[in-house]
Amino acid sequence: MGRLFGTDGVRGVANADLTAEMALGLSVAAAHVLAEAGTFEGHRPVAVVGRDPRASGEFLEAAVVAGLASAGVDVLRVGVLPTPAVAYLTGALGADLGVMLSASHNAMPDNGIKFFARGGHKLADELEDKIETVYEEHRRGEPWERPTGAGVGRVRSYDEGFDRYVAHLIAVLPNRLDGLKIVLDEAHGAAARVSPEAFTRAGAEIVTIGASPDGLNINDGCGSTHLDQLKAAVVEHGADFGIAHDGDADRCLAVDHTGEEIDGDQILSVLALAMRERGVLRSDTVVATVMSNLGFKLAMEREGIQLVQAAVGDRYVLEEMKQHGYALGGEQSGHVIILDHATTGDGTLTGLMLAARVAESGKSLRELASVMERLPQVLINVPDVDRSRVGDSAELSAAVGEAERELGATGRVLLRPSGTEPLVRVMVEAADIDQAQAVAGRLADAVKSALG
């Protein structure tokens, strides 16, 4: 069996891949592994459990809560809240464990389970591996050690979580948003209440779309993966700009007043300059991934800001930030981590900080985002090849070298084996889209020839 845990927890089609039995079993396993690691030593353990609005989250939440309580963990149910809210509350309440039920930007039939350690940080890989091992042992019949009587966990709703999280978001803003008109697309997801409340309390005039979750419509033609509705609404309402979240609101993308998309690289550019100006961009460094647009790297070099590039995945960005004490990092997809105020990507916080920069500077978002020019980027997936040989093929190495010489300093080539499928991703950037497409096509042919 393949590893259950991916880069962002356990995901699958709810009630098919991700069943109530699995949710319960993983929760019990997590409690036992953390107890064995000494996390609960000397006190009665507490977990924070939240979810996005998916219909399947209702029965999966019940299973997770039952599993934790049966293992002797007291549970605080915070209900429908964003992933970063669960992470924040896990830290703020001094809980030993956080659990979020969400499949983020995935379609409604999917769901997922993500565990947070004490402090609201993602679990280390070795702990996830241990949870999976223990889960498999007990799934095959190994009996659990079960508390009885007063030793079982108690369960209660923690309705204060909503206000506590919103208050935290407002408290960390450098300035108010008075005078701004902003369209918010909530993806019919976990931020449908939180984000409008936070932007309103901060002083903005808001228009909301995608803010009526019914359990079935999450990410359905809206949110950060479907920006057309937001683009139209911004222009229609004459707004200063728009903000889009995904289903669990750990992402933020934006749209300027003309309806043009502002991606994660551009958001990072704007926030990096704002944070440096306020003296909070530690080491004048921002962390991104190898998939970030070359235009972002060139802009940061021009502005005197160091760029550190991590592997693709916000967990790898976060690891780099924590290891070296950097304050800002993120991905082109809109996962932005502001480590002084959040332990994971926080779409609402990112949107608020972006809005604060617009309000404080008196400039439009379009003008602020123009600090970087997005170079044309072409991505081709080459299937049915031996992805393990990407770094070993002399034929492929020669083709890449030729492409890099042709592109020069204003282009870039990246060949990346997929982590889950038998394919290789070919990414080419160039100053000219025709050149990028031509080079990418030749490299895709070279991958087929060398690795097919």
Image (tube, grey):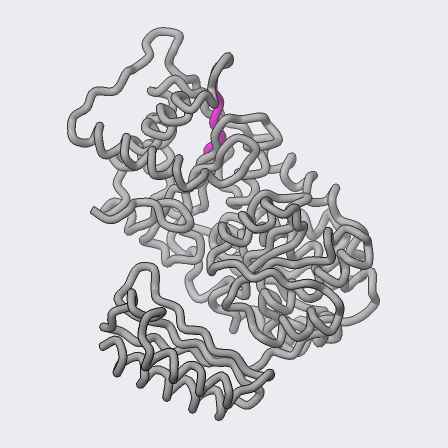
Q: Residue at x 32, y 81 (%)?
A: 395
In this rendering, position of residue 298 left or right of residue 280: left
Q: Residue at x 51, y 87 (%)?
A: 405
Give above or below for 354 relative to 145: below
Overall secondary structure of the magenta stretch?
strand
Q: Residue at x 53, y 87 (%)?
A: 407
Residue nearest the observer in this picture, 58 or 31:
31
Residue nearest the observer in this picture, 257 or 414:
414
Is residue 114 visible in this depiction of the protein?
yes
Residue nearest the observer in this picture, 8 or 106:
8
The residues colored magenta run 45-49
Quadrant in which the C terminus is drawn: bottom left
Quarter-of-image position of residue 134 = top left
Give coordinates of residue 40: x percent, y percent: 47, 19
Give above or below for 80 relative to 427: above
Q: Residue at x 33, y 27 (%)?
A: 28
Number of callouts: 0
Quarter-of-image position of residue 179 = bottom right
Give coordinates of residue 22: x percent, y percent: 27, 37
Is residue 232 visible in this depiction of the protein?
no
In this rendering, position of residue 340 left or right of residue 391: right
Give coordinates of residue 399: x percent, y percent: 38, 84
Give above or below for 144 relative to 439: above
Give coordinates of residue 78: x percent, y percent: 51, 33
